[in-house]
Each structure stands twice: as C-alpha cells, then as structure tokens.
Image (cartoon, coloured by chain):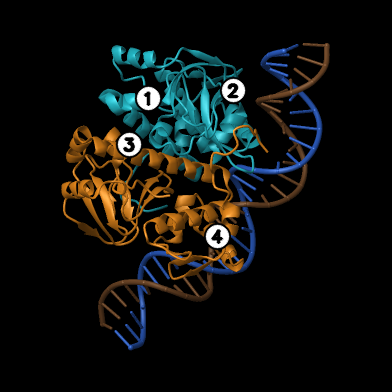
Chain colours: A cyan, B orange, C brown, D blue
Amino acid sequence: MPGSALLKPLTAEQARAVLNLHGPQLRSSKDAQLIRARDPASPLLTLISGWAFRYSLLPNGKRQILSLALPGDTIGLDTLLTGAPVYPVQSATAVVYCVMRQDQACELLREADWFREQALNALARDRIQAEAALTRIGQCTAEERVAAVLLDLYKDLSKRGLAASNTFPLELTQQHLADWLGLTVVHLNRVLGRFKSRRLISMDRNQITLLDPAALACLSFAPVPSEPTAVRG
Amino acid sequence: MPGSALLKPLTAEQARAVLNLHGPQLRSSKDAQLIRARDPASPLLTLISGWAFRYSLLPNGKRQILSLALPGDTIGLDTLLTGAPVYPVQSATAVVYCVMRQDQACELLREADWFREQALNALARDRIQAEAALTRIGQCTAEERVAAVLLDLYKDLSKRGLAASNTFPLELTQQHLADWLGLTVVHLNRVLGRFKSRRLISMDRNQITLLDPAALACLSFAPVPSEPTAVRG
DNA sequence: CGAAACTTTGAGTCGGATCAAAGTCTGTGG
DNA sequence: CCACAGACTTTGATCCGACTCAAAGTTTCG
C-alpha cells in the first residue's frame, strides 16, 4: 500500500552511500508538517521510524490521503523528477527520518545508474499503488475498501517485520483511514464496528488483529487486473 | 488528464529515432483489445490517432478506467519497469498506433540517457494524473467530478491542437466516462443533463462545448495542493 | 484531574445506485 | 435507400449506502 521503498533492494554498500548523502537523522513529533505544499526544492525524505502520509487538501477543507509512508519508505521522488505539484507530507506518529537535499538527489540521479534505476522502480510502484487506490475508491463499497486496506497494511507491515500472527499496529486515527478511503469517520467507524461484531477483526488500543483473513479477502476481492475478455456484469 | 506523452519534448531527431524503433503503424477498430491483462512482455505502445484507455476489472464486473490515452500518448512504461500488473488497454475509437517490442524498449532504457529521462518524466506525470483522479473520486461530488474532467479534457485536447473555441470531440461513451469517474451511467447522464439545462455545456453529436468554463471551473475547484496550514472544514 | 482529541452511537437525510422502460442513434444488409 | 438490430442515451420511480448533525463515551496527555 504505502510509498516507495527506495532502500530495500540495494546492496549494503549502496544503502550506506544513500544514507551518507542524507543529512543526519531528524525527529519530529506527531502531526508535524514534514513537507509543506508548494515547498520549493523540497527534499527527498526517508522514513526511519514512525508513520507519515502524503495528502491533498481541497478548497472546501476535504482531505484525500494519497499514500502512506512506513519505516523504510522514501517520499518525494515524483517531486524530484517533475517539480510540479508538491503535496504536503505529515507525520501520523512521532517519526525519525533523514533528508537528502534536492540538488544532491538530482546529482545522484544523473550520475548513479543504480540510483536512477531504483528511483524508476519506486516511482512505478507508487503509481501502481495509486491506481489500486483509484480502483478501490471508484468501484468498491465501504466494506470492501476497509477489508482491502486492512489486509494490505498487514501484508506490508509483515514484510517489514512490523507485524506478526495476524496482528499489527495501526498508527492512524480513524480520521486518517477515512480520508484515505474516501469515507467519513462516522461511516468508517460503523464498518469497523460491523467487522468486530462479525468477528472478522478485533481492535485493542491501536493493535488490529485479523481474526478471519480469508473472509476479509473474500470481501475485498483485490482490484487485480483479471479477465481480459469479460465486458461487464 | 491522459497518459504519458513520451514523444512531446524530444528533438525531432530523437522522435524519429523512437519512431524508427517502433514497428510499422498498426490499425485497430473501435473497442479492440490493444493490450490484454497479464500479457507477457507487453510492448510499449504509442497512439498516433484515436482514443484508448487503460482499465482494471473487478471480479464483480465493475470497471475502473485508470487513464486515457490521446493521440501522442505512450502506454506501458510502468509495465516496462516493473513487470508487475499489466492492465488491459482498449481502443475507444478506431486507432492508429505503433508498438515497440519490450526488449527494444528495455535496451533503449538502458542505453539512451534521453530516453530514460523521458520515461521518468512520463511516469511521474502519470502518477500525478492518478493522484488527481484519486482526489477527485475520493472527495468530490458527481458534479464536481464531471466539471473537472470536462475542463481537463478540453485543456489537454487544446494543447494538442484537437480542440478550439471551447469545443472538443468527446470520443467516449457515457459508460466510459462513468467508469472513469466512478459513477453510474444513469447518474452521469443526469449530471450532464443538469449542466445542459443550466447552460454550462452543450452537446452535439460527440462534440462538447463549454458554454461557461468559468462556472465549471468554480464548480470543480481543481484538486490542487493548496494551503499548507488548514486542517479541515 | 481536566481538557482536548478521538471513538462510538443514534436519528434523519440525501446523493447516487438500481431497476425498468422508452427514445435515439448507428451501422448493416437487403 | 430503407428497415431493422444492437448499442447508447434519456427519463421515471424507488431504494439504500453513506453522509450529516448531534451528543455521549472514552482515551490521551499535560
């Protein structure tokens, strides 16, 4: 689900090189503005711990969360390449992160093949995420969206060793989730309540446990490509 | 709005090089499957004339149109870079296009700096489009979505010299538009009807005329980044 | 301990979906 | 050139998922 994991498939040596180019580790508290909209020369940002998210605000005050960043994710590649619309990034928890100045990132992009390749991959992954989200929001009911997102989050956090035995920490408020899924908090809350009473999930603190992943998966029928021939139901 | 215009910012010479690498021009009739889901080694495809679209199908038969391709656009860059999910592409009109074999594209990507750079830019643009669509569908009402898309289409077609004096050809059925906007045909049709009776647009054949672009713009308040500080309405 | 933020629940409303059927356009073959 | 079939658009009636408004719990944290 979340943003681009720039650092994963690098050699240890390359990862070190990237981290060296980053500035020192920075800390921010919860709900801090890590990158503001229209920030000129906004830097490349790599999350070390904590959760953050990128979002867009509409003039009417509504917010759409565009992507999550989990520990290890890098934010701002798109900006680097296009300059165009810089979406603001906010922390959802206290975070530790480091940044690479835009000019440095650009240089690396110009000079280091492996970095460029990583950037391309990360960017493409991002777009795939965005399009999955588009399909979810455009075509799925609230229950389907919630089920899909819970499963995705679990899968993603597992991969990073941040979840186990069907349980994971959800470091987002329901407001965040709602803005991510294109629902209202109230309705999201009711859907979660329904899932709880149907014994599909349980929630304790911010820990989510998937009691019946199979049933959730069935509910969510992932927005995968699917049949090439069919026309419509 | 639409997909990646790979060929625009190239020198004439480079454009020729790309076109040379493409196979000969191909033609397809309306509603043809240009690329099928899970196509192995699906090629890079450049539209010369006509309209096409990329979409995803859900198991329940619902369809989400992910992006449009207008004349000049290139489809399949993401696939090239990730291999992962190949979304099917269909023509909405009779089309003329040419294709570049995946291995050739990969080679060019490896060897030609300018091509790689173009690919990066195109990819980033695509993601921006996807995220704009996400915000539209997630946070806007039906009227807002329709207004936004009509304006965007006009702007985009104008840039390509395919529209003028607030009029442009809409080579999509209402079903296409609905699947793009995450609405039902019936509801989309009512919104269009409302716009017509309010003298915001007129439709003749498949020609759309924006009678009052300012009012439409006001309705659509583009999903631009916007204020860095505000929290919510 | 108290204030603020977040979650939960209730009641009522509405935008958009669904179902159904009547027009209209398009293209095709006779 | 007309007639007809199939696809697309338009309209009506009805329904329901999700939103709104409102208020009561609950957590969090200073």
User: Position of A88 compared to B158: left or right?
Assistant: right
Per the image, the residue denoted by label 3 is: B120
In whole angstroms, how far apart are the C-alphas of marks 3 and 4? 33 Å
Within-10-Å neighbours for mark 4: few <14, some 14–19, many 20+: some
SS of the residue under disc 2: loop
In whole angstroms, how far apart are the C-alphas of marks 3 and 1? 14 Å
What residue appears at the point 28 percent right and 23 percent down from the top-left corner? A112
Under mark 4, the amino acid is: Pro
Under mark 3, the amino acid is: Leu
SS of the residue under disc 4: helix
Per the image, the residue denoted by label 4 is: B213
Within-10-Å neighbours for mark 3: few <14, some 14–19, many 20+: many
Per the image, the residue denoted by label 1 is: A105
User: Is B134 situated above or below B188?
Assistant: above
What residue appears at the point 57 percent right and 31 percent down from the top-left corner? A177
Q: Nearer the viewer, residue A125 or A201?
A: A125
In whole angstroms, how far apart are the C-alphas of marks 1 and 2? 23 Å
Camera-side mark, 1 or 2: 1
The image quadrant that residue B51 belongs to is: bottom left
Per the image, the residue denoted by label 2 is: A32
Q: Earlier in the sequence, mark 1 or mark 2?
A: 2
Percent of width and height locating residue B230: 64, 34
Under mark 2, the amino acid is: Ala
Under mark 1, the amino acid is: Ala
